[in-house]
Image (tube, rainbow, N blue to C red):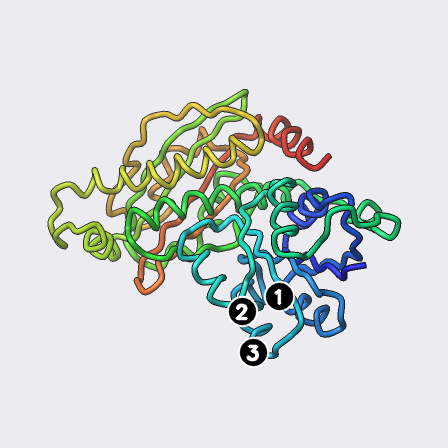
Amino acid sequence: MTPLLVCDDSGMARKQLIRALPADWPVQITQAANGEEALAAIRQGLGRVMLLDLTMPVMDGYQVLAQVQEEGLPCSILVVSGDVQAEALRRVQELGALAFLRKPADPQELRDTLLRLGLMQEGESVEAASTSAVDTGKVGFRDALREVSNVAMGRAAALLAEELGVFVQLPIPAVNLFEASELHMALADANRGDCLSAVCQGFIGEAIAGEALLLFHDSEIDDIRRLLGLRPGDETGTSEMLLDLASILIGACLSGIAEQIDVRFSLGHPQLLGQHAQTIDELIQFNRTRWRQTLAVEISYGLEGHAVHFNLLLLFTEDSVPLLSGKIQYLME
């Protein structure tokens, strides 16, 4: 049997990937939740082939690839990631990855890739295959929503990277349920004493509704204008620029989520919620009555080589949670 290592911080992602494996590929599967665990498994001979995520805590996929190269470890690595930026593909190839598949992995594409690379053969005996017996564990709702959001944010980042001509650094999305009065706590990292501007856009689809809030730091807006080829310091067109960027990030992210959970979101017109606000509370005070208890997904995009960050918060209404949970549960079954 081929020692196969599946490395991803998301239990749901590992479960989806193991289910996508060819049924006739005799493998012995080991799972790792971060890069350090993966390297330890490879050194023990448990990962002759590895399916590797990129965005992980402790040690990410890029670091794993570099370390495998440095130590000369015997491991054939296929990257399976939600980060579909062209630069991400170039970097993992440079670090020795044999293939790049986008999440969620398509079973036929995965099979074709394994055959093309000679990592499996047609007609292999399945007597020793252990794929179906692997315990992927119970996947919680937050973990599952985090993974769905991870895939969606990767698609949005690819569009942003193309628009701005930079590499977008992706975080691990944060998922929380809190009262509207606690909203500022979820964005504590975003409020660095800087004035903020924000764009808000409502969405609804099959009784799943909410609002997307995108925050910009005013001190970074000139840098954004430079990246877009606009003259720094010129306030003309700033509102339009922020609205355009919001349309890219919010639209692509919600589209990515909708595609995975099989809904269709209708989006309202984006609007500037506030400009040059001193605090996050000042930005949200007008919406406290609407947001009440809220399921929030927070994504903090960064631009490599630039002191620019975008904080995107997807706020789902309390009434949306049961249906959203049901949709995600379907993905896990």
Q: Residue at x 43, y 34 (%)?
A: 288
Circle 3: residue type: Glu
**Residue 310: image x %, image y %?**
36, 50
Sequence-first disc among 3 and 1 = 1
* Quarter location, residue 285: top left
In 3D space, how far apart are the residues under numbered discs 3 and 1 (Cα atoms)?
14 Å
* Quarter location, residue 169: bottom left
Mark nearest the camera among 3 and 2 is: 3
Residue extending furthest right? 127
Left or right, 37 with respect to 242, comes to right
In 3D space, how far apart are the residues under numbered discs 2 and 1 (Cα atoms)?
8 Å
Q: Quadrant of the N terminus?
A: bottom right
Viewer-side residue, 205 vs 271:
205
Q: Residue at x 65, y 50 (%)?
A: 115
Circle 1: residue type: Gly
- At mark 2, the secondary structure is helix
At label 1, counting other C-alpha atoms closer than 10 Å, the crowd grade (few under 14, some 14-19, many 20 or more) is many
Q: Which residue carries the number 1 mark?
A: 35
**Residue 92: image x %, image y %?**
49, 62
Q: Which residue carries the number 3 mark?
A: 70
Q: Which residue carries the number 2 mark?
A: 63
Q: Which numbered disc covers residue 292?
A: none
